[in-house]
Image (spheres, rainbow, N blue to C red):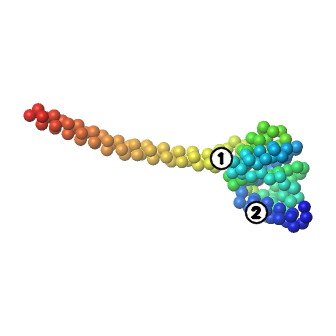
Amino acid sequence: MDRTQKEKAIAALSKRVQDVSLVVVTRHNGLTVAEVTDLRRKMRAAGANFSVTKNRLARIALKGTQFENLDGLFKGPTAIAYSRDPVAAAKVATDYAKANEKLSILGAGLGTVVLNAEGVLALAKLPSLNELRAGLLGMINTPATRIAGVLQAPGGQLARVLSAYAKKDESQGEAA
């Protein structure tokens, strides 16, 4: 890799991590190309990304970002997973690490906070942003449905009362 390629790689990685809220640093010992491709596919499905990085280039790319305090984690064969959702990359990385011992979690940066491997596992147990949104919409929608039911009930009762009076009047008119 020549100097211009390195500069482009640094600029691209730096730009990608500017818009994310979570960067998970992983160690990948012996992952095959097929396994890395599978992990990338799972990351993309969750709204995250996975990149194998050169340690020195990653350290340089993270300088000046909120994740610059992660530079101590870049030793040995490392890769990063990152996402805008503060939980997505952690969920996929920890799930994959449980199923494949070739991948291990070293730590993460959640904004300016550095998390160790246990912190990433705890973060992965939280509901994702989409799950929280769905729950919130469900909570908002339920009271609206109940309010609509309560508002409709008096109108329905009134209609039944008027209908009963109308039937009563009809039956009295026929009897006379």
Along the line of sight, the residue nearer the viewer: 123 or 53: 53
Neighbour class for label 2 at 10 Å: few (<14), some, many (≥20)? Answer: some
The circle on residue 15 is 2
Give the SS element for disc 2: helix
Q: Is residue 145 above or below residue 174?
A: below
Residue at the extreme top: 175
Residue at the extreme front: 34
Q: Amino acid at mark 2?
A: Lys
Q: Is residue 67 above or below residue 43?
A: below
Along the line of sight, the residue nearer the viewer: 124 or 8: 8
Q: Residue at 16% x, 38% y: name it.
A: 169
The circle on residue 112 is none
Question: What distance separates the C-alpha of mark 1 from that of mark 2?
Answer: 24 Å
Q: Amino acid at mark 1?
A: Ser
Q: Which residue is mark 1?
A: 128
Report whether residue 110 is seen.
Answer: no
